[in-house]
Amino acid sequence: MTWYQPETRLDRWLELYRAVARGNGAEPDAGRRLLDWAHAARYREVVSTATVWCYGTPQGRAWWGGLWAERITRSAQAEREQEQAVARGLADQGRTG
């Protein structure tokens, strides 16, 4: 995902999110790599497509931003990710951003 205008706190969160996911053996940006992975697996007849979501209205941004704010601050997943970020020295206790 990406956003405009640049926002330092969101950039830091995305950096932590990616580091924790990769530390867990996952690839948080897998979608952009799928075609390359298919070719590496010797699949040759692969059709690549994409879908884009754009939240360009104030209401759309508020809705999408609110969903993510809840997910990254108040969910069980957020707690696990914060604990992992601290345990791996990626963030300090009480300040993961």
Image (tube, rainbow, N blue to C red):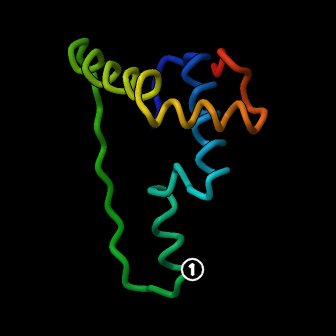
Q: Nearer the viewer, residue 31 or 25?
A: 25
Q: Position of residue 56 (x, y in %)?
A: 27, 22
Q: Position of residue 80 (x, y in %)?
A: 54, 37
- Image quarter where the C terminus lies is top right
Q: Position of residue 25 (x, y in %)?
A: 62, 58
Relative height, residue 57 to residue 35 (above, below): above
Give the residue number, with chain letter if any, for mark 1.
40
Q: Nearer the viewer, residue 89 or 5?
A: 89
Q: Amino acid at mark 1?
A: Ala
Instruction: Report whether 60 appears left or right of 67.
Output: left
**Residue that protrudes farthest toward the right in the picture:** 89
Near mark 1 (Cα within 10 A), the count class, few <14, some 14-19 or many ≥20, is: few
Q: Nearer the viewer, residue 57 or 68?
A: 68
Q: Nearer the viewer, residue 30 or 22?
A: 22
Q: Position of residue 40 (x, y in %)?
A: 57, 80
Relative height, residue 25 to residue 93 (above, below): below
Count all numbered tags in the image, as a single digit. Answer: 1
Relative height, residue 10 to residue 58 (above, below): below
Q: Residue at x 28, y 38 (%)?
A: 53
Q: Secondary structure at mark 1?
A: helix
Instruction: Report whether 19 appears left or right of 37.
Output: right
Q: Residue at x 52, y 49 (%)?
A: 28
- Image quarter where the N terminus lies is top left
Q: Residue at x 33, y 73 (%)?
A: 47
